[in-house]
Amino acid sequence: MLRSIATFLCLRCQPVTALPLNLRSRATHSVAENQQTVEALYDLSVDIQKVRKLKGWVLLQSPAYTKEVAELLKNMGASGPIIAHILTSHPEAVLCNPEQIYTQKELWISVCPNQRELVGIIEKFPASFFTSSSHHDNQRNNISYFQSLNLNKRVITKLMASAPQSFSRPVEHNELMVHTLQQAYQELGGEEANMKIWLQKLLSQNPFVLLKPPEVLKENFLFLRDKGFSTPQLLHLLSRLKGFVTELNPDSMRRTLLYSQDTIGCSETELRDIILRCPALLYYPESTLAERFEGLLSAGISMCQITETPTVLELTTQIVNYRIQRLKARGYDIRTGSLEVLNGTKKDFEMSFGKLQLRRERPLFNPVAPLKADD
């Protein structure tokens, strides 16, 4: 057994001669490579050199089903370039038995609106689709469970694509975490009528929440309660942070809160108010906050402005500096104006910037407008 493993590793480490740039040679680069696989991938315009560099072990395997996998993708509506992209980024797909792939296709079609969208998902998340057949039963059971919750099919599809591990494991794990989330929502005063929508948003925002131990959620809420957050405020944080509340832990939150309070120079009550307006402060490490506070203060922004619009701390220093320079070029002094214009996504900023520019370009005197006569 040890000898065979050593032989396999030696074969994997064989040096590969680079192909001349002006040739499309189909010569065998290693006696261990499956020549049929290499030939089939060449025919599909797959980047063989990239496959050799990153996942060369795939080319050593036999049997492989390159043509069958490509045909299945083609029948689903995938174009040649898309098939080449999928097999270049995830060449392991050619090792999947065609029967296994057909089963996987049927599972995904049960929640995916159509084959065209499924091709798009496979293009972005090939590893989520081409999984072991040993997971099919768990996948089927988890799909049935989430359907029983009346979740939107697109939400279920996103979960399968983004967090495939949650569908590969026994359904009982997901049932426990979902129950814990629903229980927390209800105990904090959430309305039963809104719970399905709330759960869909939470899972859509952070699919990996299902992979966290339920105890983490309870520990974090106990810590925040001890810090003086009321029940309605905890519900607000749970809704604003979505599933990211499970990414936190009491130790990191304790350090972040202490640093923020010392830097801002505020009371615990004032800090809670700032956190409620910018829950992201709970999970940024001290080093990140230090860089962002320093960047804002060095730009001439006061601490009072920051506490009035704390969500500006969600932006990286590079983004803030870029936006400040654009505003400055238009004559907007960020040191005396509102920081709200800095906030939001790139699209949000461009809209705010456009409105600001429009106000500046509007003439103070309109010669067409009628003059007001004296009474």
Image (cartoon, rainbow, N blue to C red):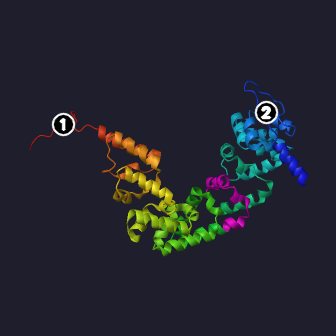
Taking depth in this image into account, of 241 and 149 the one nearest to the observer is 241
Which residue is most to the bottom? 226
Residue for point 79% across, 48% down: 102
Q: Cα distance, mark 1 to mark 2?
A: 82 Å
Residue 187: percent from left, percent from top: 54, 74
Magenta stretch, main secondary structure, is: helix
Residue for point 58% across, 59% down: 200
Q: Secondary structure at mark 2?
A: loop
Taking depth in this image into account, of 283 and 156 the one nearest to the observer is 283
Which residue is most to the left? 375
| Magenta region includes residue 174 | yes
Residue assigned mark 2: 17
Taking depth in this image into account, of 31 and 119 the one nearest to the observer is 31
**Can residue 76 be seen?**
no
Q: Which residues are magenta?
A: 152-175
Going by the numbered disc 2, the residue's amino acid type is Thr
Q: Is residue 121 above or below residue 239?
A: above
Q: Secondary structure at mark 1?
A: loop
Residue for point 46% across, 54% down: 291
Disc marking residue 370 = 1
